[in-house]
Amino acid sequence: MLQRILVAVVGIPLLLFVVLWAPAWATAVFLCALCVIAAHELLTAVCGKEKGNRWFGLAGMLGVYMILLAAFSGVDGVAEIAMLVKWLLVAFVVLLFVCVVVEYGKPRAISFLDLTAILVAGIAIPLSLSCLMRLRMLPYGGGLLLIVLVAAFCSDTMALFAGMLFGKHKLAPLVSPKKTREGAVGGLVGGMVGMILFRIVFFLVTEVQLNIGWCVLLGLLGAAMGQLGDLSFSAIKREYGIKDYGRLLPGHGGVLDRFDSVIFAAPIVWLIVSSVKMY
């Protein structure tokens, strides 16, 4: 528990600095790093250490291009760079399938399971995380990006305490034995309450009034999707018999252990924020 607290004390201010005060390119660099590390963690868990080390670079580069594409899309004066990134993304996907064909029948061939893991690590996860970059590029983007983190992390925290205090009925015992239905409900409440508090802070800082109805809905859906992400990545860990995806964050595990809820919450938040009038 002490390690978890120390990591939070150091990590949260650093994360806030990158999102709120540093230039947008710092957010892009941070997300690119997350994609590369997450690719290594997932491939190592699913494909084994040898194949994980062999192919995570390719999956990581796909992830980097996904983030860069989100960063450059719609930005004036960088249309040529955005087009180059698109071509590089396509080229690396083609390269992946060339490797599948070339390596077929050899001891280190890419199986269908390996291919699926590479595509999830290199395309699906970065595509989700790129929604954070797209939020960051909007007006008041740093604050809007925080919606995902507030909904996901407040849900995680409240679910933990609600489960400890009131938990009696198991939620998904084969996937995550300690999670309870009471904790899940507490997590949903935590996401909504967190967003109401966030709305107040957002107004005090920017003098912009976010729509309270959309904020509550974002808190609810962000928390629900975050819990689904947590359970989904836990199911992978159970299937492959691992406790944590990595040791990067002492007390928390790896990137996928800490950001699993964010990966699922980011797309729904982006879809809502980009589709409605928030203020």
Image (cartoon, rainbow, N blue to C red):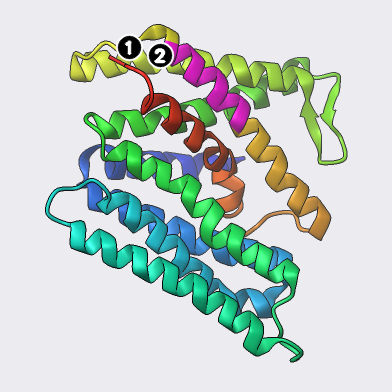
Percent of width and height locating residue 58: 51, 74
Outermost residue on the left side: it is 77
| Label 1 Cα crowd, 10 Å radius (few <14 / some 14-19 / many 20+) | some
Q: Is residue 149 above or below residue 110?
A: above
Q: Amino acid at mark 2?
A: Leu
- Residue 22 vs residue 65, the one in the foreground: 65
Q: Residue at x 72, y 64 (%)?
A: 46
Question: Please, what secondary structure does the residue beneath circle 2 have?
Answer: helix
Percent of width and height locating residue 20: 26, 37
Q: Residue at x 48, y 67 (%)?
A: 60
Give the magenta range.
214-225
Q: What residue is pinned by disc 2?
A: 197
Q: In the figure, residue 86 lies in which quadrant?
A: bottom left
Q: CA distance from mark 1 to mark 2?
A: 5 Å
Q: What residue is pinned by disc 1?
A: 200
163 horizontally vs 189: left or right? right
Question: Please, what secondary structure does the residue beneath circle 1 have?
Answer: helix
Q: Is residue 162 above or below residue 271?
A: above
| Label 2 Cα crowd, 10 Å radius (few <14 / some 14-19 / many 20+) | few
Q: Residue 208: which disc? A: none
* Numbered label tally: 2
The C terminus lies in quadrant:
top left
Q: Residue at x 43, y 25 (%)?
A: 272
Principal secondary structure, stretch drawn in magenta = helix
Is residue 252 visible in the rendered image? The answer is no
Dots 1, 2 in contact, CB < 8 A = yes
Q: Amino acid at mark 1?
A: Ile
